[in-house]
């Protein structure tokens, strides 16, 4: 079991030593800092499960420490140590967001109870947040590109305009379409998805528009089409680039007139459906080649959303991997496994031609075939790893440059952040962000 990591901040060396010994005897991993400012810098670089801080210190007070901490990280529970009888500071600390307070001299049995309560509540909050995230969407958005897409989704979901989602296969186009639907006024109505490339062209028209009894041989009853099935809701047309030209004309009429005419019917039916289309093809190029109608292209491309490939948003790879580990560990009722640094680097170096779908399949397969608690490597082709001899995507090359630059900068300044900032012209905050992004301590 992983030990909970606690940081104790107090300018008294003897008190630090005593608290450290006691908390370690309780089974915690304990780190200490005499300087509250140094502690704040350290918190920017390391993850802690709980902070125990003294109120009276020479640089800044415990209350000021809590204010500054909340600006950096609002999720770490803080316990304030205060002098006996000084309850005003304790009450103020609680108002500022501290979990609790304890008076000196410390009662370690009482402290253990408070710490356990703080960690339990913190864990519950994390679990609820993760659950909300999973219930809301299976989309992991750590990269700036995906965060921007989710912001766009929030804005356009409220309106009924058509959306065209583009991106390679496996990037999650249907997830985005579903997310738009869930956040729209149509969320309680059907979300109907159809893959235009998976249905034979001679059957696609009847699937979309439906038919009347006797419309063709075998049409023994009336049948609703998928457009009508989506009444009041959303119709997702995946791989719309596969739609035959003659059906493109009919779909354009549906979008313009908000009505359909089932096969064999002489009457049109009014519909109330939102349309979202998706493709992994270059529709603009298809228009130039005469393979896709220009008028339909502009009709569906009112709001364009492009989902980048997984190799273009490397920040999402490891969070996605962790998400799928949790998902399939729960599905198959097996212990959650951890990723070694070697395995993480493998994931980050892979080309991911199948994108998120390929990553999900790889994680599921590896979980079921790995007996050890730690996944040390993945069964992936070496030929699909990036090498120094090939041209790398710009984003990958940029990240490698940033990481190497920051590493060399820190080494040359002996990890003096202020000096590094002056030499490079990069602010301290930017340096801390880059250190955190590339896991540099």
Image: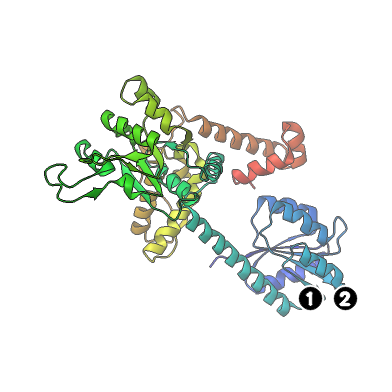
Give neighbour class at mark 2: few <14, some 14-19, many 20+ (Cα, 10 Å): few
Quarter of the image where one finds residue 423: top right
Q: Is residue 238 above or below residue 139?
A: above
Dot placed on the residue nearer the N-terminal end, 2 or 1: 2
On screen, residue 303 versus residue 380, left or right, reads: right
The part of the image, by quadrant, that contains residue 299 is top left
Residue 27 point in image, percent of width and height? 62, 71
CA gap, disc 2 and disc 1: 13 Å
Q: What secondary structure is found at the residue carrying circle 2? A: loop
Q: Position of residue 182 (x, y in %)?
A: 47, 52
Which residue is more in the foreground, 81 or 274?
274
Does 326 sit left or right of 251 as displayed?
right
Q: Is 95 on the left-hand or right-hand side of 296?
A: right
Q: Nearer the viewer, residue 16 or 295?
A: 295
Q: Of residues 261 and 306, which is closer to you in this image?
A: 261
**Badge 1 density bin: few <14, some 14–19, many ≥20, Cα 10 Å:** some
The reply to whether callout 2 and callout 1 are in contact (CB within 8 Å) is: no
In the rendered view, how is the structure colored? rainbow
Residue at the disc numbered 1: 106
Residue for badge 2: 85
Q: Quadrant of residue 336?
A: bottom left
């Amino acid at each position: 079991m992983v030990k909970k990591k606690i940081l104790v901040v107090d300018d008294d060396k003897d008190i630090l030593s005593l608290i450290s010994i006691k908390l370690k005897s309780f089974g915690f991993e304990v780190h200490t800092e005499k300087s509250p400012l140094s502690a704040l810098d350290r918190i920017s670089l390391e993850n802690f499960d709980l902070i125990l801080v003294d109120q009276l210190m020479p640089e800044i007070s415990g209350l000021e420490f809590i204010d500054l901490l909340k600006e950096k990280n609002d999720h770490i529970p803080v316990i304030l140590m205060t002098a006996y009888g000084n309850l005003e500071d304790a009450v103020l600390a609680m108002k500022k967001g501290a979990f609790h307070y304890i008076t000196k001299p410390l009662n370690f049995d009482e402290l253990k109870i408070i710490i356990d309560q703080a960690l339990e509540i913190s864990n519950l909050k994390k679990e609820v947040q993760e659950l909300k995230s999973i219930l809301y969407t299976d989309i992991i958005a750590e990269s700036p590109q995906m965060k921007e897409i989710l912001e766009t989704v929030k804005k356009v979901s409220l309106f009924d305009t058509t959306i065209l989602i583009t991106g390679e296969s496996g990037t999650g186009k249907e997830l985005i379409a579903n997310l738009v639907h869930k956040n729209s006024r149509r969320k309680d109505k059907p979300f109907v998805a159809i893959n235009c490339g998976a249905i034979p062209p001679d059957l696609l028209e009847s699937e979309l528009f439906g038919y009347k009894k006797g419309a063709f041989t075998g049409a023994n009853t009336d049948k609703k089409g998928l457009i009508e099935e989506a009444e009041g809701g959303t119709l997702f047309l995946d791989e719309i680039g596969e739609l035959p030209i003659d059906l493109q004309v009919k779909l354009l009429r549906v979008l313009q007139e908000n009505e359909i005419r089932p096969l064999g019917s002489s009457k049109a039916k009014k519909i109330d459906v939102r349309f979202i289309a998706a493709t992994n093809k270059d529709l603009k190029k298809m228009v130039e080649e005469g393979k896709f109608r220009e008028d339909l292209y502009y009709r569906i491309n009112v709001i364009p959303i492009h989902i980048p490939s997984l190799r273009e948003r490397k920040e999402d790879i490891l969070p996605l991997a962790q998400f799928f580990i949790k998902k399939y560990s729960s599905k198959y009722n097996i212990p959650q496994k951890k990723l070694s640094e070697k395995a993480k680097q493998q994931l980050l170096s892979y080309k991911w031609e199948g994108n998120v779908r390929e990553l999900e399949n790889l994680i599921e397969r590896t979980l079921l075939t790995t007996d050890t608690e730690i996944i040390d490597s993945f069964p992936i082709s070496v030929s699909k790893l990036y090498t120094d001899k090939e041209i790398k995507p710009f984003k990958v090359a940029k990240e490698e440059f940033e990481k190497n630059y920051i590493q060399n900068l820190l080494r040359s300044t002996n990890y003096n952040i202020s000096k590094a900032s002056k030499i490079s012209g990069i602010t301290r905050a930017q340096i801390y962000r880059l250190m955190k992004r590339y896991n540099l301590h």
